[in-house]
Image (cartoon, rainbow, N blue to C red):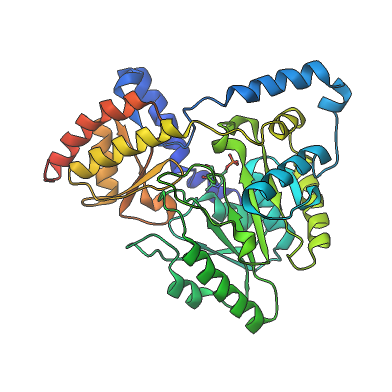
Amino acid sequence: MISKKMRPFLENNSAIRMMFEEGKKMAELYGADKVYDFSLGNPNVPAPQRVGEAIKEILDEEDPLFVHGYMSNAGYPQVREAIAENLNQRFGTSFAGRNLIMTVGAGSGLNVALKTVLDPGDEVLTFAPYFLEYRAYVTNYDGVLVTVEPDTETFQVNLEAFRAKINEKTKAVIINNPNNPTGVVYSEETIQALAAILNEKQAAYGHEIYLISDEPYRELVFDGAAVPFVTKYYDNTMVVYSYSKSLSLPGERIGYLLIPDELSESAMTIDAATIANRISGCVNAPSLIQLAVGRCVDCQADLDFYDRNRKTLYEGLTGMGFDCVRPQGAFYLWMKVPGAEAEFVQAAKQYHILAVPGSSFACPGYVRLAYCVSYETIVNALPEFRKLAADYGLSV
Ligand code: PLP
């Protein structure tokens, strides 16, 4: 008999994953070029060539016992140092290798961070719409996820609602910047205001409130948008990073958790997180790809590819009268539904368009379109969107 805790997961299995499976079935039925699957954030840009070269170099040059063996639970020291140095050059910070723990992607980095700080019953605040796995990750450690309602004008952080939801049980706050699903980049002003509220509330309640900044899309920004480096604004910040999107390596499962010296009881927290990484069952991040990203700290995915998709989709849809948030980062477009959400998602399927309902991100009334697909998918989907717009009486 499976556990009571797992049962709700079977009932509410990820809508995004189910849609992805449905997309594959539809592709078999109608042909892959006749299905417009905007469901999953699976990058369509190949990993930079340098990643493959680095893997080959490592296999040719290094001792196999070193490449495939266990290492420190926090990761290879030289990899962590290379990443710390790269961050320092880019953001004017002063991290050392000890501040980084290599993790099995951002999913694991978030779990390690939460396992490190949560006691049963602690509350974790996050902002709708949000990546729904946060709820499962928080309940893994018997925490309670509390949702702050969105500011639907800007989709920046709703500061007033945030202030109202913090209480003495709040132990952590998760932000995701650039944001999945809205494509919004939180501004410096937003981060400063958030930090001011957190500092005030920490003082009022007399305990730490950790800000966990989930940043798998950090480098995926357009139109010169700047993503503030949050450790500079708030001391009790942990940064979760992943190479899944920035280097198109989601299947490799590699990322890191950054815990700065400024965080209270930093050394103990780093030690605890290193143990959490081990006892979560991951033990350490995968060795070969860990060594490879250490040699690829300056690499980045092809941003022009995403930018072309972004502009074509946004301009196409808004030109048909759809109400969309202009994406500044990540590879998602957030669109208001003209009518009831569930009906719209079904109506889109009639035209072989797969869009994820906003309720999958705790924000009904919208859909998310992941534009990390081929350019042809976008171009060929637009006439189908036009038919959908006409069905809804939009000005096409
Ligand atoms: N956080 C956000 C906001 C995401 O969108 C994703 C993946 O889509 C993750 C975390 C998990 O990323 P990873 O593949 O590195 O575990």
x, y percent for residue 158: 43, 68
Quick check: which quadrant has ligand 1?
top right
Q: Is residue 112 visible?
A: yes
Residue lying at 42% horizontally and 30% vertically, measured from the top left: 305
Specify the quadrant of the image occupied by residue 235.
Answer: bottom right
Q: Is residue 76 visible?
A: no
x, y percent for residue 229: 59, 56
Left or right, residue 72 beside residue 323: right
Left or right, residue 72 beside residue 222: right
Residue lying at 59% horizontally and 73% vertically, measured from the top left: 198
Image height of 271 relative to 395, above or below: below
Residue lying at 75% horizontally and 40% vertically, measured from the top left: 82
Left or right, residue 396 beside residue 385: left
The front one of 18 and 173 is 173
Quadrant (top left/top right/bottom left/bottom right) for the N terminus: top right
Specify the quadrant of the image occupied by residue 346.
Answer: top left
Residue lying at 30% horizontally and 19% vertically, measured from the top left: 30
Image height of 335 relative to 55, above or below: below
- Work out which residue is located at the far bottom of the displayed protein and give it: 204
x, y percent for residue 172: 62, 65
